Image (spheres, helix red, strand yellow):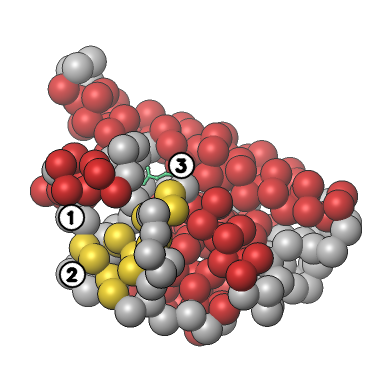
């Protein structure tokens, strides 16, 4: 198994957490340096035409892409521990929470969007940061409202870690990168803290990866 990764990538962080939870150690980690624009190099474009990480090759390939799709593949091929509830309604809630992060919020703050805001729309750094913080806060507000419900337990959905927590952890790391205070979102903050007490989450953290700075 090969994973295309970069320390700072929040989407790759999600896949690293799932790999760790499942006890899977990829044979190879291939760095795609997003700060040098390596995601746009021809070699990687052939792996993922969306020019984004993560991508995962299991066996002969072809490469899988999109973190949620990769995590569900890992969940299907390595069912223990399960990352989705057994009941259809529970799965819908967990996938919904995960998608608030991975589909509604995160895509708005990725390098290609920030670079477009800078180079095509000529927005200055404070304005670009305001954009990122805005979309973070919108997601945090929605997540907090959902997490106030009775389905929430120690984790986002009951007392077992699910795909929702994998995504919540990436949202929490992103909030830190963009200086968004999570204190006004106490359910979110509590679950983010509970996740970091789990080795599989802590080891996967962006700042624990090769090449990462000591702090942001
Ligand atoms: N929806 C995708 C997002 C993938 C994505 O945008 N990854 C970022 C890093 S977290 C990336 O590679 N961005 C490259 C770019 O924006 O140029 C997923 O969840 O896998």
**Of all residues shown, which one is farthest toward the left?**
36
Front-most of residues 192 and 161: 161
Query: Looking at the image, do the residues carrying marks 2 and 1 touch, with CB atoms under 8 Å apart?
Result: yes
**x, y percent for residue 201:** 50, 74
C-alpha gap between disc 1 and disc 3: 18 Å
| Relative height, residue 85 to residue 180 (above, below) | below
Above or below, 124 against 156 in this view is: above
The residue indicated by pointer 1 is 33
Per the model, the C-alpha gap separating discs 2 and 3 is 22 Å
For the view shown, which residue lies furthest in the front direction?
60
The residue carrying pointer 1 sits among few (fewer than 14), some (14 to 19) or many (20 or more) residues within 10 Å by Cα, namely: some
**In-front residue for pair 205/68:** 68
What is the secondary structure assignment of the residue under circle 3? helix
Marks 1,3: beta carbons within 8 A: no
Q: Residues within 10 Å of mark 2 (few under 14, many from 20)?
A: few
The answer to which of marks 1 and 3 sits earlier in the sequence is 1
Q: Secondary structure at mark 2?
A: loop
Which of disc 1 and disc 2 is earlier in sequence? 1
Q: Is residue 17 left or right of residue 29?
A: right
Disc 3 within 8 angstroms of ligand 1 (CB): yes
Query: Counting residues from the N terminus, which is met first, the one under dot 2 or under dot 3?
Result: 3
- Say above or below: 125 vs 47: above
Picture quadrant where residue 160 is located: bottom right
Q: Residue 211, labelled with which disc?
A: 2
Between 39 and 183, the one nearer to me in the picture? 39
Work out whether residue 207 can be spotted.
no
| Res 202 label | none
**Residue 172, position in %: x, y?**
49, 57
Seen at 84% across and 64% down, the residue is 86
């Amino acid at each position: 198994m090969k994973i295309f990764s970069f320390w700072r990538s929040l989407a790759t962080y999600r896949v690293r957490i799932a790999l760790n939870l499942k006890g899977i150690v990829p044979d190879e980690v291939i760095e795609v340096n997003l700060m040098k624009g390596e995601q746009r190099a021809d070699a990687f474009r052939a792996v993922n035409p969306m020019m984004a990480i993560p991508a995962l090759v299991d066996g002969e390939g072809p490469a899988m892409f999109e973190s949620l799709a990769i995590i569900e593949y890992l969940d299907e091929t390595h069912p223990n521990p399960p990352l989705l509830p057994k009941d259809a309604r529970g799965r819908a809630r967990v996938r919904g929470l995960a998608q608030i992060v991975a589909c509604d919020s995160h895509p708005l703050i990725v390098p290609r969007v920030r670079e477009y805001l800078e180079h095509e729309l000529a927005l200055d750094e404070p304005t670009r940061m305001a954009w990122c913080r805005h979309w973070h806060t919108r997601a945090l507000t929605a997540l907090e409202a959902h997490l106030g419900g009775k389905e929430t337990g120690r984790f986002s959905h009951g007392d077992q870690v699910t795909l929702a927590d994998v995504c919540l952890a990436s949202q929490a790391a992103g909030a830190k990168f963009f200086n968004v205070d999570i204190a006004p979102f106490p359910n979110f903050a509590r679950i983010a803290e509970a996740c970091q007490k789990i080795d599989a989450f802590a080891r996967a953290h962006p700042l624990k990866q090769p090449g990462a700075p000591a702090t942001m």
